């Protein structure tokens, strides 16, 4: 599509069962972000090209073509376009008594606001059709309603549910999926064997794939990921050490301090008090730690 487009179609007396309120398509600028903000209705975005990040309940997803994310009423979220390859996405905003049931059939549940969609171009086609009926008269209103139900039918049919994920991942993307999983769940206790079972491959094969992708073992990659967030919070927040420990996936401050000292040769408090940016940069480069600027 050449031009971005948007349509607001809020009705004076919306259908209580299901009502479309707005829809659109947008090629986002590099780094464009929306939020943190809570909505008063449901909004689904489908990534049609490019990449971006979605943050919900402290978790962060790195999304690309075919991924879709749900914003539920009252849920504070943040989403931002990639700096180098900003996303192009389509969206629909809606409300109604049937919304919850329909979204459940699509595959969205409270802890699963992100799904993958086969044939994401269907979303673009659906929004383009909706945009052809912008009037508030009876004819356009009924057409929009019919097209909205058709769009949900396609989402139900084409969405890849979490339980189907194993069969959808190709060999070439096992490693990428594992790294994304680490990035989204690094605050949790991750067992390599459990992740391998989730993907549907052996533990040894998963370890080899991660090593090929990153140059280090899964355990070391997870430590570096946690440390990159820890460094960010130590340098750019007033959080207590125990708070940094918890938000970075450690059970207590002692376990965190021990892991941190093992990586940097000093405890978190000593690191925070260095005050020399050059020295900090030297340490980070030496230990291959990259600060995560938007750690959430």
Image (spheres, rainbow, N blue to C red):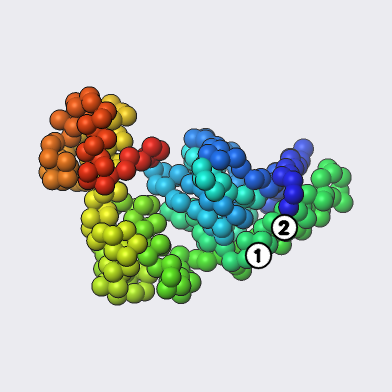
Q: Residue at x 49, y 35 (%)?
A: 36
Identify the residue position indicated by label 1 in the image: 154
Is residue 97 visible in the rendered structure shown here? no
Q: Are marks 1 and 2 in contact (CB under 8 Å)?
A: yes
Q: Residue at x 77, y 37 (%)?
A: 12
Whether residue 218 sits left or right of residue 93 in the image: it is left
For discs 1 and 2, the disc positioned in front in the rendered view? 2
Identify the residue position indicated by label 2 in the image: 126
Relative height, residue 132 to residue 31 (above, below): below
Kindly indicate the quadrant of the structure image that contains residue 149.
bottom right
Quadrant holding the C terminus: top left
SS type, badge 2: helix
Percent position (x, y) of residue 59? Answer: 40, 47
SS type, badge 1: helix
First in sequence, mark 1 or 2: give its number.
2
Percent position (x, y) of residue 234? Answer: 26, 32
Q: Residue at x 30, y 48 (%)?
A: 225
Is residue 213 visible in the rendered structure shown here? yes
Percent position (x, y) of residue 99? Answer: 61, 53
């Amino acid at each position: 599509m050449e031009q971005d487009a948007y349509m607001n179609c809020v009705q004076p007396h919306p259908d209580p069962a299901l009502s479309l309120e707005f829809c659109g398509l947008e090629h986002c600028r590099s780094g464009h972000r929306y939020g943190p903000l809570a909505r008063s209705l449901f909004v689904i975005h489908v990534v049609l090209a490019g990449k971006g990040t979605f943050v919900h309940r402290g978790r962060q997803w790195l999304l690309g073509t075919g991924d879709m994310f749900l914003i539920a009423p009252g849920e504070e979220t943040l989403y931002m376009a990639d700096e180098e390859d900003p996303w192009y996405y389509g969206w629909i905003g809606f409300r109604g008594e049937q919304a919850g049931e329909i979204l459940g059939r699509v595959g969205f549940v409270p802890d699963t606001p992100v799904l993958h969609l086969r044939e994401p171009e269907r979303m673009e086609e659906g929004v383009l059709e909706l945009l052809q009926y912008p009037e508030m008269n009876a004819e356009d209103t009924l057409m929009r309603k019919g097209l909205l139900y058709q769009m949900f039918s396609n989402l139900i049919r084409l969405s890849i549910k979490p339980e189907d994920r194993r069969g959808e991942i190709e060999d070439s993307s096992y490693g990428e999926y594992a790294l994304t999983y680490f990035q989204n769940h690094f605050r949790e206790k991750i067992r390599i064997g459990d992740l391998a079972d989730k993907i549907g491959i052996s533990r040894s094969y998963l370890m080899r794939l991660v090593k090929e992708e990153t140059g280090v073992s899964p355990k070391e990659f997870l430590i570096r990921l946690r440390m990159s967030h820890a460094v960010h919070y130590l340098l750019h927040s007033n959080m207590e050490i125990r708070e940094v420990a918890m938000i970075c996936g450690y059970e207590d401050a002692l376990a965190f301090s021990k892991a941190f000292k093992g990586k940097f040769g000093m405890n978190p408090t000593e690191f925070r008090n260095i005050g020399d940016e050059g020295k900090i940069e030297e340490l980070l480069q030496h230990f291959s730690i990259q600060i995560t600027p938007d750690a959430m």
